[in-house]
Image (cartoon, grey):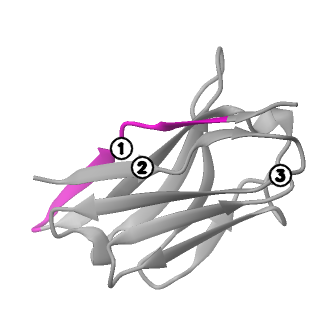
Amino acid sequence: QVQLVESGGGLVQPGGSLTLSCVASGGIFSISVLGWYRQAPGKQRELVASVTSGGTTNYADSVKGRFTISRDNTKNTVYLQMASLKPEDTAVYYCNAKGIRFGSKYDYWGQGTQVTVSS
């Protein structure tokens, strides 16, 4: 059974920093493309950042230079370091793992963690 469990969300002032973590279980971590998505109230879920099994990263334009995604395959954990946070970064952040195993595609989501940027 695959599970993704996020942590690290909270309330932070504009300009502050937070680091989100997502621990994966179920034997898929090292082969997956891992991503962080977010969904603000009234908006569609959007990709924030992703990292492939080979370490290639991709970022939304709105977070480039402020957010960093990384993965630790020894700990089955993917991180999202967020700096210079803005009120518009307020959203529920979701961890995602997708890939192909035994010839079948998979796409798993965590339960989400709230990030609120406000003074």
Residue 58 horizontal side relative to residue 4, left or right: right
Residue 8 horizontal side relative to residue 76, left or right: right
Q: CA distance from mark 2 to mark 1?
A: 6 Å
Residue 97 horizontal side relative to residue 81, left or right: left
Q: Read off the magenta span.
A: 102-115
Percent x, y of residue 38: 59, 38
Give the answer, above or below, for where 58 lies relative to 119: below
Q: Secondary structure at mark 3?
A: loop
Q: Is residue 112 magenta?
A: yes
The earlier-in-sequence mark between 3 and 1 is 3
Seen at 82% across and 31% down, the residue is 118
Percent x, y of residue 117: 78, 35
The earlier-in-sequence mark between 3 and 2 is 2
Reading the image, the residue beneath label 1 is: 110
Foreground pick, 43 / 89: 89
Reading the image, the residue beneath label 2 is: 6
Q: Is residue 80 magenta?
A: no
Classed neighbour count for the residue bearing mark 3: other residues with Cα under 10 Å, few (<14), some (14–19), many (≥20):
some
Percent x, y of residue 13: 84, 40
The earlier-in-sequence mark between 2 and 1 is 2
Q: Which mark is residue 16?
A: 3
Q: CA distance from mark 3 to mark 1?
A: 24 Å
